[in-house]
Image: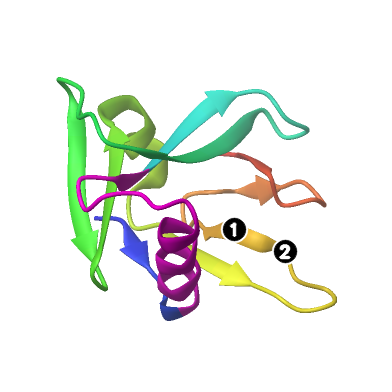
Amino acid sequence: MLFVADSAKEKVLELVQQESLGEDYFVRVSVTSGGCSGLSYKMDFDNELQENDQVFEDNGIKIVTDLKSFLYLCNTTLEFSGGLNGKGFYFNNPNAERTCGCGESFAV
């Protein structure tokens, strides 16, 4: 399962409205090679499901990931932090053994 915190839900809904995206759009998250710690998160809006996609809905937000990425993201929560020291969107990933200082990459 992938989870969406209240803070991330509010920001996702705000961005959907700003971009005038239809109801068929969802949040796609994935893991790619790269970054300081070896693996990086990728997040975008999408409206096309792929063959091996894993589809979840939490807190009213549809979130989709490919099967390979799900192995790294299982039980991860998408969060958002704003303000002066805010990180923007970030992932609270219980599978990550270490993360880099910027929080954009991790290792398992």
Q: Nearer the viewer, residue 36 or 82?
A: 82
Q: Residue at x 57, y 69 (%)?
A: 80
Amino acid found under the numbered disc labelled 1:
Tyr
Q: Which residues are magenta?
A: 7-27
The x, y position of residue 105, in whole percent, is 67, 40
> Which type of secondary structure does the marked residue at label 1 adopt?
strand
Q: Amino acid at mark 2?
A: Lys
Pick the residue in front: 26 or 108.
26
| Image point (47%, 40%), residue name | 44
Are the residues flagged by discs 2 and 1 in contact, CB closer than 8 Å? yes
Asked whether, in this view, residue 36 is left or right of residue 105, the answer is right
Residue in view at x 69 percent, y 45 percent: 104
Percent position of residue 23, x then y: 21, 53
* Numbered disc 2: secondary structure: loop
Rate crowding at label 2 as few (under 14), some (14 to 19) or many (20 or more) other CA atoms within 10 Å. Answer: some
Q: Tell me where residue 54 appears, x and y as whole percent.
A: 19, 38
Outermost residue toward the front? 20
Image quadrant in which the C terminus is located: top right
Labelled disc at residue 39? none
Q: Quadrant of the N terminus?
A: bottom left
- In the image, 103 versus 20, the foreground residue is 20
Residue wearing tag 2: 87
Q: Gap between marks 2 and 1, in whole Å?
A: 7 Å
Determine which residue is flagged by label 1: 90
Q: In the picture provided, is 43 more to the left or to the right than 25?
A: right
In the image, residue 34 sits, relative to residue 8, either above or below, namely above
